[in-house]
Amino acid sequence: MNSRLLQHYIPLSSAERRNIELLRSGQPFIANNTLSDRKSILMANGFIDVYRECRYIVQECEHTHNHVEIAYAFSGDSCHIVNGERISMRPGELLLLNQRARHKTPTLNEGDVVIYFNCLPQFFSPSLELLGSESTALRKFLGGCMYSENPQAENDFIHFKVGSEYQVQNLVKNLLYALTFSKQNIGKTNQATMALLMLHLAHLMGNEEFDAEQSALAAEVMAYIEERFVDGSLNDLARRLSYEMNRLSKNIKQLTGSNFSELMQSKRISHAKSLLEITDLSTTEIARRVGYNNVTFFYRLFRDQVGCSPGDYRVTME
């Protein structure tokens, strides 16, 4: 896997070779865009895509994004200016940026490869579910990304110095490999991988020991909820995982801070929000599609979790 990623991301592109010639001529390519707009691309690509930062260009202006950006220092050293603060990144480190972060990257040389994971906020719904209800810094950050007009995080970015964390590197590279080379639609798997990555990072922020067995269980639970949130059940999940149901219920609560039913409800409401944003389906039909035949109950649950009715939410997203 590593060798194929290296072969794909290290070589210079034709555009980068032109940039070198421009630099040598004293007329460098200058990037002066102030907004990185990838929303329509991300909507078409399962809420996430990946690209390599172009090397040998000069960024004169800070820019913001209408999506969440995760910078990954794939190789070499790089520098990022975020909200006026200079951040140096070593290989393997991660930098999470929300939609309000003002960001630019000084000129990168050939060995300095920075890869960006670009995500719409709804891509992190499984991550929030897995992180549970506890008010941690990472959960606040991701929660704030979901409501860009109403910042909830204390900072617009988080820098993770995780170059030596094997499990983190393995998850990042698995996600990168899937997004780069997979020709199949594995969006749910990618969301589960990202959720597990966020769980690892949250534990590292809290300096907690991370249990690999529990990590695997968390990934299984989130993958199941992503696949079966309409009609799944704790009993079915326990049968699939060969767990005693009460034990599984307790483990899920310990891992996420929420019980299975709460995780299912959270995923259903998250999917309902997406349908309200991108379709013209009636609220009754959306309720049915996310697993609620009782529309009155769906309305009440939606209002409790989102703070407004489905109709009002659709209006605010137009």
Image (spheres, grey):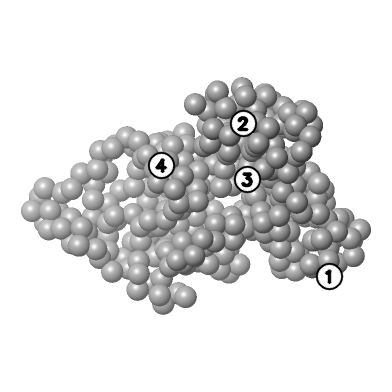
Instruction: Provide residue 3's location: percent of width, then percent of height.
Output: 41, 77
Which label number is shown at residue 40? 4
- Side of 88 where 172 appears, left or right: right
Q: Is residue 113 visible?
A: yes
Q: Residues within 10 Å of mark 1 (few under 14, many from 20)?
A: few
Instruction: Provide residue 201's location: percent of width, then percent of height.
Output: 62, 55
Query: Which numbered disc, 4 or 3, marks the residue that appears first in the sequence?
Result: 4
Task: Nearest to the eye among marks 1 and 3: give it.
Answer: 1
- Side of 278 where 129 appears, left or right: right
21 or 247: nearer the viewer: 247
Q: Residue 240: name its quadrant.
A: bottom right
Secondary structure under the numbered disc 2 in the rendered image: loop
- Side of 142 where 98 appears, left or right: left
274 or 120: nearer the viewer: 274
* Residue assigned mark 1: 242
Label 1, label 2: how far apart the Cα atoms are: 39 Å
70 or 304: nearer the viewer: 304
* Residue assigned mark 3: 125
Q: Residues within 10 Å of mark 3 (few under 14, many from 20)?
A: many
- Asked whether disc 2 touches disc 4, contact meaning CB atoms under 8 Å apart, the reply is no
Residue drawn at 35 percent across, 43 percent down:
104
Q: Amino acid at mark 1?
A: Ser
Instruction: Provide residue 235's location: percent of width, then percent of height.
Output: 85, 59
Secondary structure under the numbered disc 1 in the rendered image: loop
Q: Amino acid at mark 3?
A: Ser
